[in-house]
Amino acid sequence: MSAGVASGLITNAIGRRVPTLVNGREQVPYQGVDGYRPAGRKAGPPVRSNSDYPTNGDKRVPDLETALRLCGLRDGMTISNHHHLRNGDLVALGALQTAARMGVKDLVWFPSASFPCHEPVIELMKSGAVHHIEGSMNGPLGDYCSHGHMHGLGVLRSHGGRWQAVQDGEVHIDIAVIAAPTADYFGNADGSHGKSACGSLGFALADSIYADRVIVVTDNPVPFPCIPWQIQGNNVDYVVEVDSIGDPSKIVSGTTQITRSPDRLRISELVARFLRDSGIMRDGFSFQAGAGGIALAFVDYLAHMMKAANVKASFVRGGSTKYLVDLLQEGLIGYILDGQTFDLDAVRSIASNPRHVPTSPFTSYNFHGKGNFASMVDAAVLGATEVDVHFNANVVTHSDGRLLHGIGGWQNCLFAGCTILAVPSFRDRIPVIVDEVTTVTGPGELIDVIVTERGIAINSKRRDLLDAVKGKGLPIRPIQEIKAEVEKICGGKPAKPRLLDNPVAVVKWVDGTVLDTVWQVVDDNPYAPKVSGAE
Amino acid sequence: MPAAAETSVARRGEAGRAGLDVRSDLHVSFEERLSGGIDLDLRSRVDLYYGESIRQQVRSALQTLGVKHARIEIIDEGALPFVIAARVEAAVRRAGLGQDKSALPEAVALPAPSARDRLRRSRLYLPGNEPKYFINAGLHGPDAIILDLEDSVHCAEKDAARILVRNALRAVDFVAAERMVRINQLPVGLADLEEIVPQAPDLILIPKVETPEQVSDVVGVMESIAKRSGATRPIWLMPILESALGIENAFAIAKASDRTAALTVGLEDYTADLGVAKTPGGTESLYARMRVANAAHAAHVQAIDSVYGDGADSDGLLRWGQASRAMGFEGMGCIHPIQIEIIHRAFAPTPSELEKALNIVAAYEDAQAHGLGVVSLGSKMIDAPVVQRALKLVARARQVGLVAEQTGAVGAES
């Protein structure tokens, strides 16, 4: 049980009860979107000397165990991994299991995200090798944490928040183990080539810069220099060559398919029409898009409208797919600034097209810096599991309180010029538009538009958007009206799930303050659908 | 699982579907008991949110159906209340109980009655036993939805589907869509009419009509049901001609009842009847379609085309729809909501047609205002039928928003 790792619950600026102490560290409660100002200097890794590294640059060691031993692995350390290999990853589990075999205890695992393939980490937590996870938890790991089995408290951060936490010294990485689809013996590494190619390696960049020790693990060793390199060998301590870092079929999908669901297509079309009719779609505009069903379809509709209006986008931020790559090649968009590369066409594109550029959470998302790309985008189209009448939204828990998704770049994207949540108004019989979200992941003041199959709700703070689309034939409706309609269809307001007064995880805001708490669930519905994690 | 065989004949019934691939439906397993009240075992995806509400609903439905003692097992995949009511009723009826009783869901307000000559460009087919497609069907903007009890429903599920469709007519808001039902051929269709007619559908499609008598039979049944239930709202008819004989009798069928608002054709069955292949070009059915169009116009009812079966081929659909309009049809069926907008485009007048018609209408109104019997445009005299066609075209264009209501100016596309 996680009793005792969280304490001193107080109510923060958005009215949520949050702990002031998490895993032994003092916390700052959320103080509003822009309420908190950091002080001090960035964290930094220890100073090293060339004298301790081979002058010929060859940092290879025989295996991961040797590398971990040379890194000084011991009890209680924080081990980090990135998630660019998604559900095909073999390296994170390999590193943790090797560490467990070496007899260490109480590790903190700090992945940039976890996937169902990481389920065996549960065994490592049961045996005591891993103490807790700070990172997104889905599927079986999410259930394990949600039921209060983890020894420490889960800490959920956005991609930008993870960079911020490392940079600000909130999380100190002892050993970063970086899976690299291509690397040379010096430690220069890249993700766009090799049999396990995954595109950008941006999520591993902070780890390579700030960790005390850095191990690069590759299944595609190339002679020095590895060109291009996204990870600099100058930050790397050891290089390990293995047969395989992952299952390519689960790293990238073949071709991502556009949804055929009529309801999702309707939502996607409404999103595209909103962008067109509000005037956001104009020459030189920019947008953010992901790889979910609605996101792919919305890009398809928008592309047709852009062609019809002879409009080009200057850049697109986001997870890249074949659909974005096609637009890039057609000249409809100037650049793809790529955070995650989702399919084979996108991997090929990032490896060969100079206008398809890998980015990192530093350039795209970090809030404690001198600006970031996500806030420069004209429009971001995102999903959510719940949205409430105050436009607050939830992406981390299911309506029953169980952990469902990581935050990903979602929080960071809320700073776009126009933030649109594209969601069905209910799923099966579960309302998505509700009185109050189960877990606040994003404050409503940053969320401008909710697009559902039953109409579009615009945040009253955005008078300009309301005026811009007046008389354009879009189904603009008050959010309360959509909510009331959904409750009528579903047969009344849904009952609130019973949650125990025991925190199992916290949700961080982009500035490191605590936005909300995830509470322990009561296991009283064995027939609840099993959720599979993604991103 | 039931452990031992019952000594007496227990009355049992099952209905609906559950499983990992099923959404918005439920499986109900019902067994009558002699005593002990209602023993309800509910496993629901949405138990946390609506478990109590479902239990209450099931108990009250059983009471309405006159069931006092029973074991009832439900696996629910997030079904809406009107579906739960339908599946419980179907299971009870299959057990031989609850005859002549209905567990009706709460009703939504009925839309305004539909006009005989209303716009019927697109009609979206909804398989009658697949509840997950019902609730959002109207949002996609078809001129009509068709709750289908015929070919899309397995013959072993006809009873369950008609209860579900009845409940949908009552409880689902189909927005602006006309609410159509395709019944089965008589005599199976008799039972369909018994459930459907009291719930005031706007139009009933009668399949595989070959003779005018088949239409009169349906009308007779509808009238006696309406008399019993006191319903007075108009329910229009659309006979479907799907055989060589039906095509030959097209005009007589179209004239068989003044409830008939439209005549349509079913090409899958028609080509099968002819023993020929159904081709994308449709040469083999050209005669049948022209015959239907002509008969419909002769009888002053709408001519409505069949469906375009390839849901992924939007260019082919657009061409088919445009050709169909040119032959005199006013609409066609949809098998997927993405076809709706394309069909509406296909059946819209072209900009040049519309401009010409607007000029003629303006000249006609001018002549009327000046008390002139002859309408002329420039140096040309316009014949009366041409004026009539222009008036009709402009009226339709107004209905679909291509012409602004007051000014008569050509409006921008949304």
Image: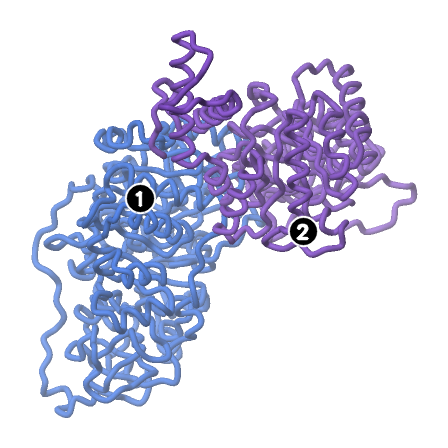
Answer above or below: position of A81 versus A184. above
In the figure, the shade used to draw chain A is blue
Q: Nearer the viewer, residue A362 or A93?
A: A362
Q: Secondary structure at mark 2?
A: helix
Residue A426 place in picture, x, y as percent: 47, 39
Q: Which residue position holds label 1?
A: A516
Q: Nearer the viewer, residue B196 or B21?
A: B196
Answer above or below: position of B409 versus A287. above
Evaluate whether residue A9 shows in this view.
Answer: no
Evaluate whether residue A58 shows in this view.
Answer: yes
Chain of the residue where label 2 is placed in the rendered structure:
B
Residue type, numbered disc 1: Asp
Residue type, numbered disc 2: Glu
Identify the residue shown where x is 30% and y is 64%: A110
Chain of the residue where label 1 is placed in the rendered structure:
A
Q: Which residue position holds label 2?
A: B284
Q: Nearer the viewer, residue B332 or A31?
A: B332
Identify the residue shown where x is 33% and y is 71%: A198
| Quadrant in the picture for the C terminus of chain A | bottom left
The letter of the purple chain is B
Decide if residue A341 is on the left or right side of residue A187.
right
In the figure, residue B324 lies in which quadrant?
top right
Identify the residue shown where x is 27% and y is 88%: A61
- What distance separates the C-alpha of mark 1 from that of mark 2? 66 Å
